[in-house]
Image (cartoon, rainbow, N blue to C red):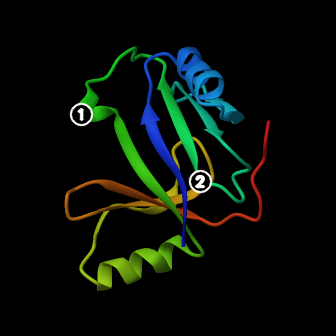
């Protein structure tokens, strides 16, 4: 396994991208809109996603602010097989909060588990490569 990204929900995507790229020196690696579910994802980081952990900024089109307590999204881990990973986690007493399957509006296979403090950990099926902007 390896850590892929951390997700934060943001109220203003343009301001957030500007902060992470202009203030913190990250690069905008890729961005995509999901019109059906009304959200935009922007991935920023210091290097290519194939070698570096990055930050996912999620902008839900109908939300312009969040309480600090619910701005945290999840930690993502890449796994070779999301179904087998869930079976192993379940066998060790782990809690699967979202069974494996495709992400809403896409084809990427994911699942979610909860740590002892109830933080969300996303398991993402390993892909051959990632597309960049």
Q: Which mark is residue 69?
A: 1
> Which sits in the foreground, 105 or 29?
29
Where residue 63 sits, quadrant-wise, is: top left
Q: In this view, does 65 lie above or below 107?
A: above
| Residue for point 35% across, 39% down | 72
Q: Name the residue under label 2.
A: 53
Residue 12 locus on image (x, y percent): 49, 16
Is disc 2 in contact with disc 1, using a CB cutoff of under 8 Å?
no
Q: In this view, does 75 lie above or below 57?
A: below
Classify 10 Å Cα crowding around label 1: few (below 14), some (14-19), many (20 and above): few
Tell how many labels.
Answer: 2
Q: Is residue 52 left or right of residue 75?
A: right
Q: Is residue 114 above or below residue 71?
A: below
Q: Quadrant of the C terminus?
A: top right
Q: In this view, does 81 lie to the left or right of 64?
A: right
| Residue for point 38% across, 42% down | 73
> Which sits in the foreground, 17 or 88?
17
| Residue for point 51% across, 71% down | 82
**Mark nearer the viewer, 2 or 1:** 2
Q: Residue 10 carries which label?
A: none
Residue 54 locus on image (x, y percent): 59, 47
Where residue 96 sits, quadrant-wise, is: bottom left
Q: What element carries label 2?
A: loop
| N-terminal label among 2 and 1 | 2
Classify 10 Å Cα crowding around label 2: few (below 14), some (14-19), many (20 and above): some
Residue 97 locus on image (x, y percent): 30, 59
Q: Quadrant of the N terminus?
A: bottom right
Residue 10 locus on image (x, y percent): 44, 25
Q: Is mark 1 on a helix, strand or loop?
A: helix
Residue lying furthest left: 117
Q: How far apart are marks 2 and 1 (CA)?
A: 23 Å
């Amino acid at each position: 396994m390896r850590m892929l990204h951390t997700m934060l929900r943001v109220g203003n995507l343009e301001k957030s991208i500007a902060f992470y790229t202009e203030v913190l020196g990250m690069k905008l690696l890729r961005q995509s809109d999901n019109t059906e579910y009304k959200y935009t994802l922007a991935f920023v980081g210091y290097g290519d996603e194939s070698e570096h952990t990055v930050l996912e900024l999620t902008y839900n089109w109908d939300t312009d602010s969040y309480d600090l307590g619910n701005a945290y999204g999840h930690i993502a881990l890449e796994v070779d097989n999301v179904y087998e990973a869930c079976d192993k986690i379940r066998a060790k007493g782990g809690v699967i909060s979202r069974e494996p399957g495709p992400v809403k509006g896409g084809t990427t296979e994911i699942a979610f588990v909860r740590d002892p403090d109830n933080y969300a950990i996303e398991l993402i099926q390993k892909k051959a490569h990632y597309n960049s902007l």
